[in-house]
Image (spheres, rainbow, N blue to C red):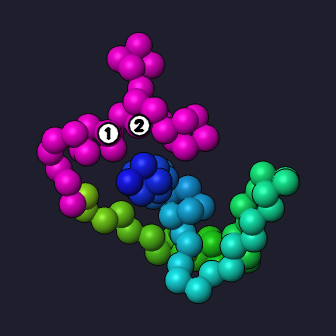
Amino acid sequence: MELLLVMYHQRLLLAPIALVEEGDIISIDIPGLKLELKVSDEELAARKAKWQPREPKVTTGYLKRYASLVTSGNRGAILKSSADE
């Protein structure tokens, strides 16, 4: 569940993970701590240009709160405090 919430947040930010499509090749380099999407820059630019955000399925409750307050995955996907804003 945590991974899905982080991915949802990345899609909202239009991070490269938001542009992955079925059948794309992803290279995983564990020692190098890298994930690489094997798609050309031109294709990514085209995908970004046509990308439209979806309406959120959850509009109330804790999941809505989490989605609006969570930090990005590289910052730990933790909730921002009111002091952070």
Q: Secondary structure at mark 1?
A: helix
Mark 1 neighbour class, 10 Å CA radius: few under 14, some 14 to 19, many 20 or more = some
Residue 50 can be seen in this image: yes
Tell me the residue that label 2 is attached to.
70
Of 70 and 32, the residue lying toward us: 32
Relative side of 15 to 35, left or right: left
Which three-letter amino acid code belongs to the residue tagged 2? Answer: Val
Q: Secondary structure at mark 2?
A: loop
Asked if 5 appears above or below 84 in the picture, the reply is below
Relative side of 14 to 52, left or right: right
Of 43 and 15, the residue lying toward us: 15
- Extent of the magenta region: 57-85
10 in magenta:
no
Q: Are marks 1 and 2 in contact (CB under 8 Å)?
A: yes
Relative side of 47 to 27, left or right: left
65 in magenta:
yes
Q: Position of residue 53 (x, y in %)?
A: 36, 63
Residue at coordinates 39% horizontally, 20% vertically from top-left?
Answer: 81
Tell me the residue that label 1 is attached to.
66
Residue 42 can be seen in this image: no
| Image quarter (top left, top right, bottom left or bottom right) of the C terminus | top left
Which three-letter amino acid code belongs to the residue tagged 1? Answer: Tyr
Residue at coordinates 49% horizontally, 38% vertically from top-left?
Answer: 77
